[in-house]
Structure formats: structure tokens, C-alpha cells
Image: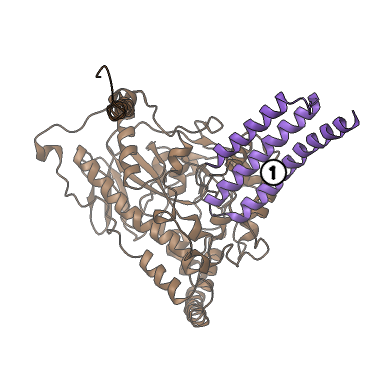
Amino acid sequence: MLWLILGLVLGAGVYWLVTTEKVKLTWYEWVLAVVGVILLLYGIENYSASQLELEPRAGGFLLLIIGLPGLILAALAGVLAFLRAKKA
Amino acid sequence: MPESLTRREFMKELGKLGAVASLAPMVNLEEQASDKAVGLQRPSFIKTQDEPTSGVDWANVNRYAEFNTVRRGFTKYVGEDEANRLSELRAANLDKWLKEGKDGYTLLDRAMQSGAGSGGVPRSFIGPQKAKTPEDLGVPKWEGSPEEAAMVVTAALRHLGAATVGFVELDTNTTEKLIYSHDPDGVELRIEDAEQPEETEEYRLIPKKARWAVVYTVQMSEETMTRCPTPIGSMTTSLTYRRSQNIQERLQEFLRGLGYMGIGEASTNALGIAPAFGVMAGLGELSRLNRLVTPEYGPMVRVFKLLTDLPLAPTKPINAGIWDFCHDCLKCAEMCPPKNLSFGDATWEVRGGWNNPGHEAFFENSTACRSYWNQIGTNCGICFTVCPFSSKNLASFHRFRNSVAAKTRMFNKAFVSLDDLLYSPYRDQPETPQKSAASWWKQNLPDYGIDTYQTVRETS
């Protein structure tokens, strides 16, 4: 269920980014966003699997170590695009 | 199908279609079985090879008497006075900690330890000999290729409770030397030309035609072992031994039913050197713990063996990067309270009479280990539970680590540091269980505390 929801959110997000006129990402913003989202998903996967492994402490650290950099990269892509749109 | 369907009829037909679709693979089961390769279908980063990753000089390997291990010969190595002193210390500590209600040593934990250590049929060299043989039934004995035999024995063992299964063909100049010269009870193990195995008070006779060793692992619960060194942690091994007793007897009867002999361990750790057989069967690699570490469960298994005259396709030793990893990782040695494990490189020099020469290993000081067991009033297992490969492998990070470690040693130290952070909150206090014993009682655990689907997941 978690992956279904994440897939729907991700699909909707990508669809909006591709179709909207308000935001146009440059190639390097796309790279940052894709790498960021992949890391974030990998962090979430390790977090949820660690819960099943009864290792919540490890899950928290994995989310922090893998997911947080992913979130920062994805956010950076968003911030760059936002600042550029604001300037224009 | 009717030309015009009501909603109810449509759903009924859809159900039939679903049933046909789900049964379709079963129709071809026999065909698929014949195509199945022998051995574990492991990820490609685990390579098979002719020789084990740890060196063996077969010319200098001799059959070893099990009673020389510290398990049986502790008093011989430390002296009677020291053995008695430790025995008294053990009793005093257990009594003190029970009354103090120390975590893992409470009445609840001690009772659970007693429960887990009970049950299981007695081990037997030749098995109960009760199953009807093909001769009794008036039919010829089961025949199949060595590959088919390996397949059915694996299927049977897995159903009976084993985790991973491998096979070693005995050779007089090499692998036969892994059979003990004497069992733990001092009884000699003779290998001679004979039709049937035989057991007397002086010797146990293994017919020369029993050329195949079935080697199998039985999983241990990480959730109890991680609470060692405590009685609740010690039930990890005792429960696994009790389970394995039933597995051995059932395998012996299965083989008898097929028309073959099943020569088992007459007592715990009898018959042959378990880690060595595990390495030769490709179930894992030798490690700094000087025990078998498997790619699937790390060291969280116990290893058992049985001899048979049913020809079985041998499985090869593996290289999963584990032996190399142990050269870069000192975690078990550093966290061993009596510092009994090797801190150096692997060597051919044994540490004492409890080691068998002729192979390369991280030889350990077993007397220090056993003395510590007495001090804490139970067995230990810290080295098992802190091993980075002792992971349940649901989180994909573990698979990533295993695949990288199999290819390069470059990141091994980083993986160890990460493992410290993730799984060893008491890295600097190894005598403190990494999880509290009291918390074990509140967990919702699977049968036997193990994930029985792990082998399937990792070998499919």
C-alpha cells in the first residue's frame, strides 16, 4: 500500500512537472530531482524494511543517511526552479 | 461460456479462468523440476570455485578427535582446579543475578531457557530404523541421477526445517579427513569396507560406500542471540540443536525409506567438523569467528552433517567475499569480552590442541571463550550476533553491501562503521546485550523467531 501511494504521488508530481507552464526545469534540475527522489525512495524502502526486521533504530538511521540527502537534493531542484521562475 | 451472461455468471466464469491460470504452472511442475539446476540459486556475485577461499593443505590435515575440542576437553587444558573454580563461579553468579533480577537472568528467562533446551529426539548414529524399506514393501529402491537425488534430499530437508543444503563427496585424501577419528564420547569412528554401519561400545563403523555427506544449516533466531550473553540469549543455540535432532532423525528415516543409509551424528557435534563441511559444501566461508559465515544468514546458523550411500551431486565451495571481509573487519574480535578471537591475519599456526592443523584460519583461544561462559553462567554468542553479515536482509541496503563486499574490499571498513552505527548501540560495552532481554517478551515474532522464507527470497 505504501508503494502504491508513493507511486501515485510520484506519478502525479512528474505529470504536473511535465505539463505545467508555471515551472520548467533545466536539465541539471531534472538530474538533481531524479537523484534526490531515488535516494529518498531508497531511504524509505530501507526504513520500512528495517521496521519489519524489528530494527527501528537502524531504520531511522538509514532514512537519515540515505533519505535526507535525497530530500535535500530534490528540494534544491525545486528551490532553483522557483528562484528562476521568480526572477523571470 | 454462455452467450449472454448475468453479472453473477460473469464473475463465476472469471473465477474459473483465474483457477486455470493459477494451476497452469503446476501442470508443468515435473518438467520444471528436471530443468532445475542443482544447488542454491544464489545471486551472481556469489561465485563457486573448486577450492575454498581459506587455504587447505590436505597433506597436513589429519582426522581429528572431537574430545580434544574445548567443548569436551576444557579441564584438560585449564587444569582441574581452574575448572572447579570456574564451575563454582558460574553457580554463584547465576544465583546472584537471579536474585537481583538482572536483565536476561530473571526467573522468566531461566524458565524459558529450560523450556527451549527441552524436547527433540535423542541423536542416533544409524537412526531409529523404523521406516519401511523398499525391500519391506517389495519394490526396488529409489533410483535417480545424483542431481535428482540432490534435489529431492534438499526438498525433504527444507521441509523438515533445514535452511540451506549442500553436498560433499568424500575423498580418502581430502574431504574424508573431515570425519572425526573419535566422536565426543571417545568412541572411535572407523571407515571400512562394510555393507551396513555398525555401532559398538568401542567403535562406530562407517561403510566406505557411504561416500556422500549431506551438509545443512538450521537457522537461529537473531532476536534471541542479540540478547546474549544471557540465558534468554543462550536459548538460541539450545532450541536450534533440539530442532536439528528431529531433522536428523527424519532425514535418516527418509533415506531408509528410499533404500539408503543415513549415518548421523551420535551426539551434538559428532561425526565430523561442521564448519569445514559447510565450507566444502559451499554453504558459506570460514571467518574471523573461526566458524561458518553464510551469505544468507551470516553466522546465524548451526551446521549439521549426515553420511549416505545415495549418490549426490556435490556442491562447490563459494567466494562471496566473506573471508576477505573478515580480513578488514575486527568487530567480533573487538567485541569479544575475553578477547579470545584473532586480531591478526589468518594463519596456518594453530593456537592450541583444540585447533586442527592443515588449514588457514583465524585461530582462536578457545579456553578463554569457555572460561568466559563459566563466568557469565551461560553460553555467549556475541561474536555471532555482532557480525555485520548477521542481518535479516529485508532492507535492500544489506543486499547492496553483500554485492559490493563480494567484488571489492575497498568499502569493507565503511560497511563495518555503518554496521556499528545501525546495529550496535553498545559497541563499547560488549557485555551489555545489544537489545534488552526484557524487550524480547513484548515482540511479535514469527515461528521459532526466524524468517523461514529468507532462503527462498535469497536463492530465487
Q: Nearer the viewer, residue B118 or B276?
A: B118
| Residue at image coords 30%, 55% | B266
To which chain does the residue with label 1 belong?
A: A
Q: Name the residue under label 1.
A: A67
Residue type beneath disc 1: Gly
| Residue at image coords 76%, 28% | A30
Query: Which chain can be seen in brown?
Result: B
Is residue B61 found left or right of B133 in the rendered image? right
Is residue B422 found left or right of A33 in the rendered image? left
Q: Nearer the viewer, residue B29 or A74?
A: A74
Residue B447: quadrant of the picture: bottom left
User: Which quarter of the figure is the N terminus of chain B placed in?
Assistant: top left
| Residue at image coords 30%, 59% | B120
Viewer can see residue A81: yes
Please identify the residue farthest to the top as the structure is shown.
B3
Is residue B448 found left or right of B51 in the rendered image? left
Residue B94 is situated, as x and y percent measured from the top left of the image, at: 48, 77
Residue B416 is situated, as x and y percent measured from the top left of the image, at: 67, 49
Q: In this view, does B409 lie above or below B218?
A: above
User: Which quarter of the figure is the C terminus of chain B placed in?
Assistant: top left
| Residue at image coords 44%, 76% | B107
Crowding around mark 1 (Cα neighbors within 10 Å: few <14, some 14 to 19, many 20+) is: many
Query: Which chain can be seen in purple?
Result: A
Q: In this view, does B206 lie above or below B227?
A: above
Q: Is mark 1 on a helix, strand or loop?
A: helix
Viewer can see residue B354: no
Q: How is the image coloured?
A: by chain
Residue A75 is situated, as x and y percent measured from the top left of the image, at: 77, 39
